[in-house]
Image (cartoon, rainbow, N blue to C red):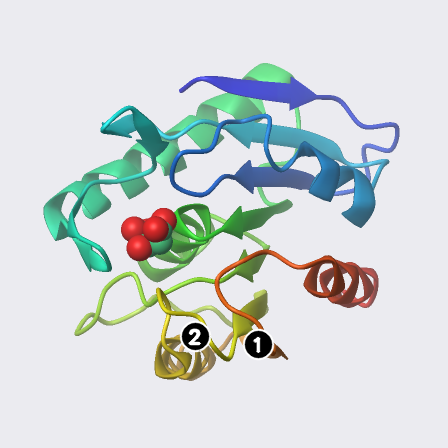
């Protein structure tokens, strides 16, 4: 997968996996990684799908309606890419923390829904529930920070509540942070995610 890897100053720190929103690139979230932990490795990946020229991490049938078969395939592809990248760049495969926005947050939560040890933790900005009606792996010991907007037209508030419950029922510890905003990524939610990250 097309990506950027930046080696951090401190190899005891996690590797921050950056996953952009629809129409984004691997450049987009680099400032977030700098803000969250400037000493950590950064692996920023570009989604393999193009929707009218806009990169994404998996196909959708309509706004908010995911192509489940492609989601499963792309989630596996990303998980395998993480295995390969950990070997190639010599970072700890068991210490990856995802930071995703919108479509990137959705593939990050899909990694957790399908693979027990894909991620150690995740910061999910404006995610949806990636799939319903499946048993999640045991996520005991995993940590998730969800930032959601009370007026988000793409992710209704109930989606965020449902995602929190599904992850918690699988054993993860989840913090759900609300902004009185829409789908946009706000400075305040990034600041709050940064404080949460320091508490891990
Ligand atoms: C998705 O397709 O993943 C969500 O609808 C959010 C987005 O527009 O990226």
Q: Quadrant of the C terminus?
A: bottom right
Q: Quadrant of residue 109?
A: bottom left
Label 1 Cα neighbours within 10 Å, binned few <14 / some 14-19 / many ≥20:
many
Which residue is identified by label 1? Answer: 174
Which residue is identified by label 2? Answer: 167
* Nearer the observer, 77 or 18: 18
**Do the numbered discs 1 and 2 sit on residues whose CB atoms are within 8 Å?**
yes
Image point 58% across, 54% down: which residue? 120
* Nearer the observer, 90 or 133: 133
Q: Where does the image place residue 179, in percent across and percent down from the top left? A: 62, 75
Dot label at residue 118: none
Compared to residue 82, the image places residue 175 above or below, namely below
Q: Quadrant of residue 136?
A: bottom left
Compared to residue 161, the image places residue 99 above or below, namely above
Q: Where does the image place residue 198, in percent across and percent down from the top left? A: 83, 61
Compared to residue 100, the image places residue 24 above or below, namely above
Q: Where does the image place residue 107, in percent across and percent down from the top left? A: 37, 48
Label 2 Cα neighbours within 10 Å, binned few <14 / some 14-19 / many ≥20:
many
Image point 46% across, 33% down: which residue? 24
Question: Residue 196 vs residue 106: left or right?
Answer: right
Disc 2 is placed on an element classified as helix
Please tell me which of labels 1 and 2 falls first in the chain: 2
Question: Residue 42 vs residue 103: left or right?
Answer: right
Q: Is mark 2 within 8 Å of ligand 1?
A: no
Whether residue 85 is visible here, answered yes or no, is yes
Whether residue 115 is visible here, answered yes or no, is no
Q: Where does the image place residue 84, in percent across and percent down from the top left? A: 46, 22
């Amino acid at each position: 997968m097309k990506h950027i890897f930046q080696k951090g100053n401190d190899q005891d720190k996690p590797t921050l996996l950056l996953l952009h929103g629809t129409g984004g690139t691997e450049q987009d979230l680099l400032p977030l990684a700098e803000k969250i932990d400037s000493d950590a490795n950064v692996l920023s990946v570009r989604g393999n799908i193009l929707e009218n020229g806009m990169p994404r991490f998996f196909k959708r049938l309509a706004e908010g309606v995911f192509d489940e078969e492609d989601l499963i395939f792309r989630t596996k592809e990303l998980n395998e890419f993480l295995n390969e990248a950990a070997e190639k760049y010599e970072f700890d495969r068991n210490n990856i923390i995802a930071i995703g926005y919108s479509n990137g947050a959705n593939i990050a939560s899909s990694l957790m829904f399908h693979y027990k040890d894909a991620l150690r933790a995740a910061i999910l900005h404006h995610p949806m529930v990636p799939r319903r009606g499946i048993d999640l792996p045991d996520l005991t010991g995993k940590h998730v920070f969800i930032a959601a907007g009370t007026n988000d037209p793409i992710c209704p508030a109930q989606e965020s509540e449902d995602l929190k419950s599904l992850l918690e029922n699988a054993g993860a510890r989840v913090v759900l942070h609300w902004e009185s905003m829409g789908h946009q990524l706000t400075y305040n939610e990034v600041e709050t995610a940064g404080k949460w990250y320091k508490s891990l």
